[in-house]
Image: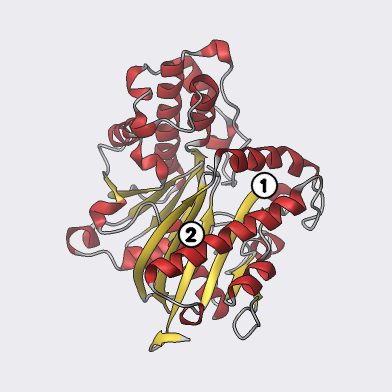
Amino acid sequence: MATGGNLKRAIGLMSGTSMDGIDLAMIETDGDGAVQRGASSFASYDAQFRKRLERALETAKAIEVRSDRPGDLAELEAELTDRHAAAVEDFLAREGLSASEVEVIGFHGQTVLHRPSQALTVQLGDGERLAKRLGIDVVYDLRANDMRLGGQGAPLVPAYHRALAAGLESEWAQETPVIFVNIGGISNITYVSADADLRAFDSGPGNTLIDQWVKHHAGIPYDSGGAIASEGRVLSGLANRYLSSPFFSAKERLSLDRNDFKVPGDEEASLEDGARTLAFVTAAAIAKAQAHLPEKAKLWILTGGGRHNRMIVEDLTVATRHTGRVILAEEAGLNGDSMEAEAWAWLAVRSLAGLPLTYPGTTGVKEPATGGVLARGQGCDVA
C-alpha cells in the first residue's frame, strides 16, 4: 500500500562489512527525488554470531558459482535471514506498525565474497524466506545484474546520495560539488556536481584494518572514538606502504573486498601506533579520491561508523583544508548511521519502478542498469 500520492513506505536492511549487526531504516519515497526519512534502529549481533560470520569469509573463498553454499553457509544463511526477520518484527512493534503498512523491504544480506574481476558477488540472505516470514514483499540481490552488465557491483548507494544532495537545505545547498564519504569497513565516496553529474567508487580501507588491529591486540571490536589512535603516532613507512598500493594510482576504479588490504604484522607497530597509522591511511586514501574526479569538492559529508573516529576526521580535515569543508552527516540534517539502510529502502522502491540503480560513473556498468529480485510476501499466509 502506498502512503499517499506516489510514495511508498519501505524498510531498508543493511548488514555491512563490519559485521556488527543490522541497520534498519524506514522511509517514504517514490524511488526518485521524493524522500521522507523516518525512524531507524540497530540490532547488534552477539560475539559468537560475529565469529561465525568471520569464519564464513574463509569458507566462501571456495565458492565458484553464486548459488554454492559450502560448509555451514546454508545453515548460517537461514539463521542470518531469521535474525533480520526478528529485527524487522521488533522494529515494527516499536513503531506501532503492522506488516500491511509496509510496501516493501530492501534486503542487502551479508557479503561474504566480492570478486568483480570474476563478476562474482555473494550475499548471504534468503529473500524468499524473509518475505514469507514477514508477509511483506522483499527486494534483494541488488548487485548481481550490475555485474552481469559489466559493472563492479558496488557501490550502490550513490544514486541515493544524489537524491539527498538535491534536498540539502540552507547553507549546504550552495556547497557544490559535494562528496558523500561512507566510512564503513571499506570507504567509498560519491561525487555529485552542481549539475548532478554522479561519480562514485571505493576509496580504500575504512574501518576494517583498524577493527582487526585493535581486536587482535586489545581484544575489543573497534577503536571507540579513535581513543587508542589518539595515543599513537603515524608511522610514515607503514603508511606509505599502504598508500603506494597500485589500487590508488590505477586509472580504473575498482571495488574492494574486505581482505584486499592486510593488517600489519605484530612486530610492525605498537597497539597505539598501529591504530593511529591505520586511521591516517583511511583519511589519506579518501583524500586521494580527488585525483580521480573532475573538480575539487567544496563539501565533504561523512557517514558510516568511521565518522566517529576523531583521528580519521581530523586527518581528512587537514588533507582537504585548501579545497573544501568536512562535516558530519548530522550537521547537514542527515543520519550518518542509517543512511545505507535508508538507501536500501530507496533502492527497493526504485527497483519496483524499473529505474536505474547504477550508472557508468558509479560502478562502471556499460549503461544505466536496474536490478534486484522481488520475493512476494504480501497476500501470503504467514505462520
Give, as a three-letter code, the residue at label 2: Val
Specify the quadrant that holds the C terminus: bottom right
Give, as a three-letter code, the residue at label 1: Val
Q: Which mark is residue 340?
A: none
Q: At 67% from the left edge and 47% from the top edge, which residue is drawn?
A: 112
Whether pointer 1 and pointer 2 mark residues with C-beta atoms closer than 8 Å, the reply is no
Cα distance, mark 1 to mark 2?
A: 19 Å
**Residue furthest top in the image:** 267
The image position of residue 22, as x and y in percent, is 51, 53
Q: At 63% from the left edge and 72% from the top edge, which residue is drawn?
A: 131
Q: Which mark is residue 157?
A: 2
The image position of residue 248, as x and y in percent, is 53, 36
Colouring scheme, one of rainbow, by chain, secondary structure, one colour: secondary structure
Q: Is residue 11 left or right of residue 4?
A: right
Q: Is residue 383 left or right of residue 61?
A: left
Seen from the viewer's position, the closer of residues 111 and 321 is 111
Badge 2 marks a residue whose secondary structure is loop
The image position of residue 312, as x and y in percent, is 36, 33
The image position of residue 129, as x and y in percent, is 68, 68
Q: At 38% from the left edge and 69% from the top edge, which residue is drawn?
A: 95
**Residue furthest left in the image:** 170
Q: How many marks?
A: 2
**Among numbered discs 1 and 2, the one appearing first in the sequence:** 1
Q: Which mark is residue 112?
A: 1
Seen from the viewer's position, the closer of residues 103 and 382 is 382
Asked whether residue 121 appears in the rendered view, the answer is no
> For the residues carrying marks 1 and 2, which lies nearer the camera in this image?
1
**Residue furthest front in the image:** 383
Asked whether residue 340 appears in the rendered view, the answer is yes
